[in-house]
Structures are given as structure tokens and as C-alpha cells.
Amino acid sequence: MSVGEDRDAEERRAELERRLAAVRERIAQACAAAGRDPDRVELMAVTKTVPAADVAVLLDLGLTLFGENRAQEAGAKVAEVAALRPDARPRWHFIGGLQRNKARTVVGWAARVESVDSVRLADALDRAAAHALDEGRRTGPLPVLLQYSVDGDAARGGVPADGLMALADHVAGCAGLRLEGLMAVAPLGGDAGVDPEAAFTDIERAADRLRSAHPEASVLSAGMSGDLEVAIRHASGVVRVGTALVGYRPLASL
């Protein structure tokens, strides 16, 4: 590595350290305002289009949970990070829309899939998880979250309120899957007519309904860079932060 590359790497590490400290402070302040224990809110770094070298630095800085949106990119990155930090134990979650034909690939590296929004996808993951168990690539069922849709926007994915419980019952009956809770992508606060408070109230109520029927489904993953404070106020236990943590990614790579 050249002197210039060393300097760039040091500057990037310092930037990531500053950003991480700022995000952690936001989480701490939001928890204090909501009367919640900050240890009960986990930070996930969303690393879509982020290079493996940045993930390695975030591991060095103490982060262990990473979310990926694209199956093909993620598989290569998981392997690259493992080569860069062979002694680290990152947890990789898949958080994006998933094609059924990619289920077997994702099951090979994901500690949890957070975007189950249909019976057909659940069945594909169930088959893939059973196959991975048979091959010894997994030691137990695949943990999953149901992705809940607040507004029915297909671009964000998710199952609407009237289909949530039927999907939950189906997933709970899949031997290869373990239902752990709910994930949601709230409408952007800047969108016309969007009330973030109302959106997260809806998400919290959906999580409560799910947990009432399936007590083991206690995880709520909601809130991102722009709305993590509202999400924490409404009981989110995992906030998925990309831009605030790693900066803006090139549009060409999204």
C-alpha cells in the first residue's frame, strides 16, 4: 500500500469512527428520552455497496451486526470480510427484497432473513434451510422476520396488515424456519402526507399483534438513518443505519 493509500485508509477509519460515535450518541439520547435501556437497542450497519474494507474497520470499532440488500453482492462481501478479519465473528442479516431462486444462496451465509413477505418466499427459504441442514451448512432453523408494509407500497415490499397473521401462522409451521419477529421500512418522513409518528405507531401495534399470537416473535427491526429516534420511541429493538454511518453511496452502484 502506498503512502497515499495509507493516508486515505487512515482518514476513512477516522471518518467511520466519528460517524459511529455520532450514531451511538443519537441512539443513547433517543433511549434516554423514551425511558429505554440503550443496551436493548442494537445497531445494524447497512453495508449495501460498502466495500469489505469498511466493514473490516467497523468490526475493529466494535460493530458486529451488518445488513445486506443484494444476495449476489453480499455473498462475495461475506467471503472477502472473512479473509480480511478471519478471527472476527460478524453477523450478517439479509434485509432486502429476495427472489426465491436466491434463497439457497442467502441461507448459506445469513444469520437472519428480515424480509419475508409472502408464503412463496417462506416456502423457498424453508426448503433451502432444510437442504443446508442436511448438508451440515446450518445447525438449526433459519431465523426470519416478517416484513410489514405500512402503506402497501410495493417498492418497499412487505405484507399488509390484513395478511400479516396468516403469513405468521404459515412461517411458524415451517420446520426449517424460526419466526423471530417483525421488520418494517416506514414511509419516508419527507413524503407528502406522511406522518412518521403515525407510521411507527402502526408498526408497533403490528409487532404487538404478532407477539400476542406468537410470543417467540419478540424482535422489532425498524428505523433507519432519518427516523431512528421515532422508531426507538415506538419500541424498535434494532435500527438499521446506512447513510448516517457510512456516508452516501454512489448512485451508480445502488
Image: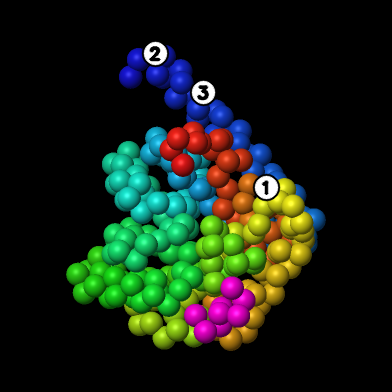
Mark identifier at residue 3: 2
Q: Residue at x 71, y 51 (%)?
A: 191
Which numbered disc, 3 or 1, marks the residue that appears first in the sequence? 3
Residue 197 in view of the camera: yes
Residue at left offset 45%, top offset 73%: 118
Is residue 155 shown left or right of residue 253?
right
Asked whether 155 or 138 is in front, the reply is: 155
**Image spot of residue 66 (x, y percent):** 47, 51
How many numbered discs, if any?
3
Disc 2 packing (10 Å; few <14; some 14–19; many ≥20): few
In this view, the residue in front, 147 or 42, is: 147
Secondary structure, magenta segment, majority class: helix
The magenta segment: 160-167
Image marks 2 and 3: residues in contact by CB distance under 8 Å: no
Instruction: Judge depth for marks 2 and 1 and give the one in front.
Output: 1
What residue is pinned by disc 3? 11
Q: Residue at x 66, y 57 (%)?
A: 187
Helix, strand or loop at mark 2: helix
Residue 29 in the image, given as x and y percentages of width and height? 75, 49
Coordinates of residue 159 in the picture (x, y in percent): 54, 72
> In the rendering, at what x and y percent does residue 252 appear?
45, 35
Q: Viewed as shown, does residue 1 lie left or right of 32?
A: left
Q: What's the CA distance linking mark 3 and mark 1? A: 25 Å
Along the polypeptide, which appears first: circle 2 or circle 1? 2
